[in-house]
Image: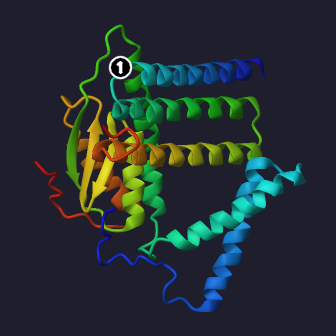
Amino acid sequence: MSSPPSSVDRDGTQGRSPVLAALSVSVLTVLFAGLWLTLVGPTDPGSWIIGVPAVIAAVWARQRLAPAPGRGLSLLGALRFLPVFLIESFKGGIDVARRVLGTRLRVEPGLLTYRLSLDSRAARVFFVDLVSLLPGTLSADLQGDTLVVHALDCRVDAAPELLRLERHVARVFRERLPEQGAPTP
Amino acid sequence: MVALHWLAAALILAGLLFFVAGTVGLLRLPDALSRLHALTKADNLGLFLVALGLLVANPEPFFALKLLLIWLLVMAAAATGAHLIAKRAVRGDGEDAP
């Protein structure tokens, strides 16, 4: 596994008062129960046979994996990113469909590396998942700051797109990227 | 009303086409990493279109929230799962390791 940067606290609950921790457990339980209720609907009480263990597991996992408190999220950044994400999702889906539905497969798979500038774990996980949802790229491995990206067509240079995406993610997570976020050659 | 139903049908049908494309990709692409592309991207768009079509057919706020949740959860699961499979494939230490 990648070693987290020293600025990222692995245990997000550390240093919080017990009252706050207990409160967050009850708030989380209500939240996840609401999530379950939204998914299965309120008409079937029997669904709680699965729902209760699922909610408990979700609260436990969230407490175990809670990211260190970061700078919070930027609503404006998220709103600016949403249309970009939708458009890129469309391009990604159409691109793959066109490549595989033709009589000849038009792919030239290859690996490339990309140096991540994002700092917080939450932003990194978000970015790693996004890379896989957007056109032509799939995040294959993350070792330290180096993201190994699989490209469906390595004749197209993916680095500028990744840089643009990383800037969007940085805005959503209120992070500052270095001015010249140079991708690894 | 009728126009909306046709719109819903068209959206769902378009979504299903992307699921078909994703499946064709899964069968035709040469290696595990390339196949993951088809699964994450084509299916994500397919699900978005199907969810949008269902919302047009049944425009209720609670139902919309449910569809939004399903879409977000499936996307997060697909992208994270794809990353984990890809990581094993790149490092060559998974079950399929030669």
Count of marks placed on residues: 1
Please, what is the three-letter code of the amino acid marked with disc 1? Arg
- Compared with A179, B46 (above or below) is above
Q: Mark 1 points at which residue?
A: A99
Residue at point 31%, 10% (across, down): A104
Q: Quadrant of residue A61?
A: bottom right
Q: Is residue A57 left or right of residue A89?
A: right
Can residue A173 be seen at all in this image of the molecule? no
- Please name whichever residue, A102 or A11, is drawn nearer the observer in this view of the structure: A11
Q: The N terminus of chain B is located in which quarter?
A: top right
Q: Mark 1: which secondary structure?
A: helix
Q: Which residue is most to the left?
A: A185
Report the residue at 66% width, 64% height from top.
A57
Residue in the picture at 36% in, 43% down: B86
Residue B57 can be seen, yes or no = yes
Q: In which quarter of the image is residue A131?
A: top left
A171 in relation to B38, above or below: below
Quadrant showing the C terminus of chain B: top left
Q: Residue at x 77, y 62 (%)?
A: A52
Q: Position of residue B78 (x, y in %)?
A: 50, 43
**In x, y percent, where is residue A25?**
66, 77
For residue A49, above or below residue A112: below
Taking the image as shown, residue A114 lies to the left or right of residue A83, namely left
The image shows residue A130 at horizontal and vertical percentages of 40, 47
Q: Residues within 10 Å of mark 1 (few under 14, many from 20)?
A: some
Residue nearest the viewer, comparing A59 with A28: A59
| Furthest residue in direction top, as rendered | A103
Q: Mark 1 lies on which chain?
A: A
Give the colour scheme of this rendering: rainbow
Q: In this view, does B10 lie above or below A165?
A: above
View extreme (front): residue: B98
